Image (cartoon, helix red, strand yellow):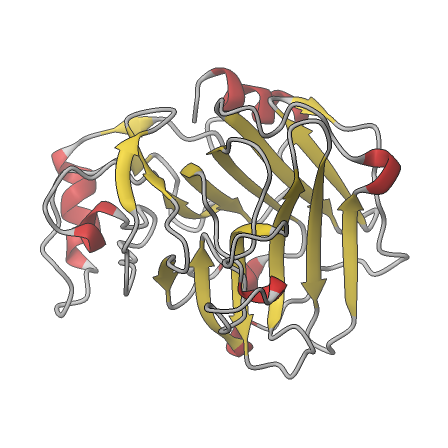
Amino acid sequence: MKSKIQLYVFSALALMVIASCQKMDKPALGDFPVDANPPGGPLKFYAAYDGTTTDPLMNAVDSIRANFASDNPLTTIDGIRGKGVRGVNKKFIKYAKPNDWAKTSKSFTISFWYKRDGQTKNNTGTNGPEYPISFKSSNGHWSGANLFVILEGNNAACAVKVMIADATNADNWFTWENANTIPGMLDNAWHHIALVYDAATSEMKLYKDGVVNPIVPKWGTHGDINIDDTKISEMRIGAGPGTGYDTDDWLSSTWKGDLDQFRMYNTVLTVSEIQTLFSNKL
């Protein structure tokens, strides 16, 4: 479990190792959470948003490869653990890539904490989806993306939708919607989400606060997720892949709540491991 479930460590050695591979045109590193992930380990991207400096790019750094955001216009807030970020209409955090997550993932787990109060909205204030994460893509897919995660609805009934387009532009929606919407997700309290795709079964499981949802959607016999990393043009935290920010375009909607502790693994986490993330507020 220790090779997957990451704990906070602040050690001079870890900072020296990361600093040694830092890009020279990025800000100098300060103190930020460093995960005890072994080289080449399953945790491929981790942003805790715990920085307390005056540099917003440093505050959004990914701890795995010292991967700095190219833009972080979001507000720093108290998160589920340390600091987090608050969504701003029409704005989001940008990274060039999710490190080598897409290159190495056959199965995967995406884990994050969020807090949202009430009905999700498009950018013009009408009801619509909001995106914790998306990968903008040049793959030619109709969505302009090869992955995004949507929350849509209100606290009585919230849908969760995950769209993935593979290297051939074959796509699939893994959804918990209509009769399978989930109550109690948008109650202005912190909740943990884990999305787990298993290439062995082509199924995706949704965990909320450490508990797996009984609905388990499947992508036929697709197998390996097979996302084309070369086509990812931008990784976005807090927005969809679109560019129509001043319209009600649902693909351009941004996140209006709070976010914290983004983790992306290239493996299937077990139930116990996901519960540890939840119970330890990781």
Counting labels gives 0
Residue plotted at (85% across, 49% down) = 218
As drawn, 134 above or below 108: below
| Quarter assignment of residue 182 | top right
Residue 57 relative to residue 127: left or right: left
**x and y, in percent, of residue 112 in the image:** 50, 37
Residue 225 relative to residue 90: left or right: right
Q: Looking at the image, which residue sits at the far top?
A: 279
Query: Toward the viewer: 253 or 200?
Result: 253
**x and y, in percent, of residue 97 in the image:** 42, 65
**x and y, in percent, of residue 167 in the image:** 68, 75
Residue 103 can be seen in this image:
no
Residue 63 relative to residue 228: left or right: left
Residue plotted at (61% across, 81% down) = 139
Q: Looking at the image, which residue sits at the far front?
A: 125
As drawn, 173 above or below 201: below
Residue 29 relative to residue 245: left or right: left
Residue 203 can be seen in this image:
yes
| Quarter assignment of residue 93 | bottom left
Residue plotted at (70% across, 69% down) = 166
**x and y, in percent, of residue 146 in the image:** 62, 68
Q: Quarter holding the C terminus? A: top left
As drawn, 134 above or below 270: below
Residue plotted at (53% across, 38% down) = 111
